[in-house]
């Protein structure tokens, strides 16, 4: 079995939890070299762009909490930072 990279793990978990209309996960670890939490192997800093009906009527804080809950294992482990851009369909 091939080793799954963290970007794929995050994508799969968010896909399963929110069935998004669109999802993009960007590994920005290379931009944080020398910063706290950075590792030479990368996979520490991510940015998520997600559009899902699950966020309709939810505040920005609630959306972030939902995503943080779905990725709790990753955030308590190797992921140091996660920037979130979460919208409901038709927003923005």
Image (tube, rainbow, N blue to C red):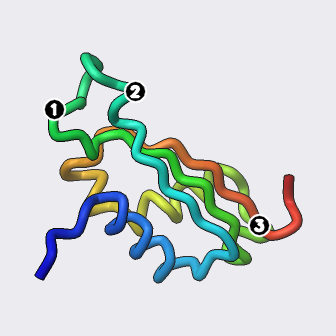
Q: N-terminal of the two: label 3 or label 1?
A: 1
C-alpha gap between disc 3 and disc 1: 35 Å
Q: Where is residue 21 in the image (x, y as percent from the top left)?
A: 69, 76
The residue at the point 42 percent across, 45 percent down is 46
Question: Quadrant location of the N terminus?
Answer: bottom left
Q: Where is residue 40 in the image (x, y as percent from the top left)?
A: 16, 32
Of residues 60 and 24, the one drawn nearer to the viewer in this rendering: 24
Q: Is mark 1 on a helix, strand or loop?
A: loop
C-alpha gap between disc 3 and disc 2: 28 Å
Q: Is mark 2 on a helix, strand or loop?
A: helix
Q: N-terminal of the two: label 3 or label 2?
A: 2
In the displayed orientation, state which residue is furthest to the front: 2
Work out whether 38 lies above or below 57.
above
- According to the picture, the residue beneath numbered tag 2 turns out to be 31
| Residue contact at pointers 3 and 1, CB within 8 angstroms | no
Of residues 65 and 74, the one drawn nearer to the viewer in this rendering: 74
Q: Position of residue 42 (x, y in %)?
A: 24, 40
Give the quarter of the image for residue 2.
bottom left
Work out whether 43 lies above or below 86.
above
Label 2 crowd (10 A; few <14 / some 14-19 / many >=20): few
- According to the picture, the residue beneath numbered tag 1 turns out to be 40
Horizontal relation, residue 53 to residue 45: left or right: right
In the displayed orientation, state which residue is furthest to the left: 1
Work out whether 36 lies above or below 92.
above
- According to the picture, the residue beneath numbered tag 3 turns out to be 88
Give the quarter of the image for residue 58.
bottom right
């Amino acid at each position: 079995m091939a080793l799954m990279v963290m970007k794929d793990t995050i994508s799969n978990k968010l896909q399963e939890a929110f069935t998004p209309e669109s999802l993009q996960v960007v590994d920005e670890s290379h931009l944080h070299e020398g910063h706290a939490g950075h590792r030479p192997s990368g996979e520490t800093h991510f940015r998520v762009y997600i559009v899902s009906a699950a966020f309709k009527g939810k505040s920005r804080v609630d959306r972030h909490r939902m995503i943080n809950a779905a990725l709790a294992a990753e955030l308590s482990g190797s992921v140091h930072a996660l920037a979130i851009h979460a919208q409901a369909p038709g927003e923005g």
